[in-house]
Image (cartoon, rainbow, N blue to C red):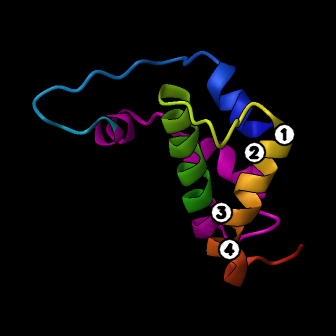
Amino acid sequence: MYARFVVVTPPTTVVFTGNWVPENELARRAGLTTVPGSLAPVVDGYLPRREAARLVELLARLVISYFLAPSEQVDLGDPESAGAFIEAFILPAFQPTLTRS
């Protein structure tokens, strides 16, 4: 559900890189909220904040990757396919820090 939100929600701010400064650094300097900062509270009840931010950033990057280069094995627009992908590849990486299931 949140992955679909990230894909279909138009950005409110576009950041262009200047002078070889990475986009995330320009956004931080400008005080813009990034995906981990804005969506991490959604999983705060399950993970410590730092791990929640890592999870959200990983998921956002995966959604963008699969959006730009679709896969025949995974359809993140299909809840069953996305759930199977998350259970197989994402949850095991964060299992040691989950605070509830």
Q: Do tag 2 and tag 3 residues touch (Cβ < 8 Å)?
A: no
| Position of the N terminus by quadrant | top right
Q: Quadrant of residue 14?
A: top left
Q: Which mark is residue 90?
A: 3
Q: Position of residue 75 (x, y in %)?
A: 70, 36
Q: Main secondary structure of the magenta part?
A: helix
Q: Do tag 3 and tag 4 residues touch (Cβ < 8 Å)?
A: yes
| Position of the C terminus by quadrant | bottom right
Q: Quadrant of residue 49?
A: bottom right
Q: Do tag 3 and tag 1 residues touch (Cβ < 8 Å)?
A: no
| Disc 2 crowd, CA 10 A, few/some/many (<14, 14-19, 20+) | some
Q: Do tag 4 and tag 1 residues touch (Cβ < 8 Å)?
A: no
Secondary structure of residue under mark 3: helix
Q: Which residue is mark 2?
A: 82
Q: Quadrant of residue 48?
A: bottom right
Secondary structure of residue under mark 1: helix
Q: CA distance from mark 3 to mark 4?
A: 6 Å
Name the side, left or right, on which 87 lies relative to 14: right
What residue type is disc 1 on?
Answer: Pro
Residue situated furthest front in the rendering: 72
Badge 2 or badge 3: first in the primary sequence: 2
Q: Do tag 2 and tag 1 residues touch (Cβ < 8 Å)?
A: yes
Q: Position of residue 32 (x, y in %)?
A: 47, 33
Q: Which residue is mark 4?
A: 92
**Eyeballing the image, is 80 above or below 96?**
above
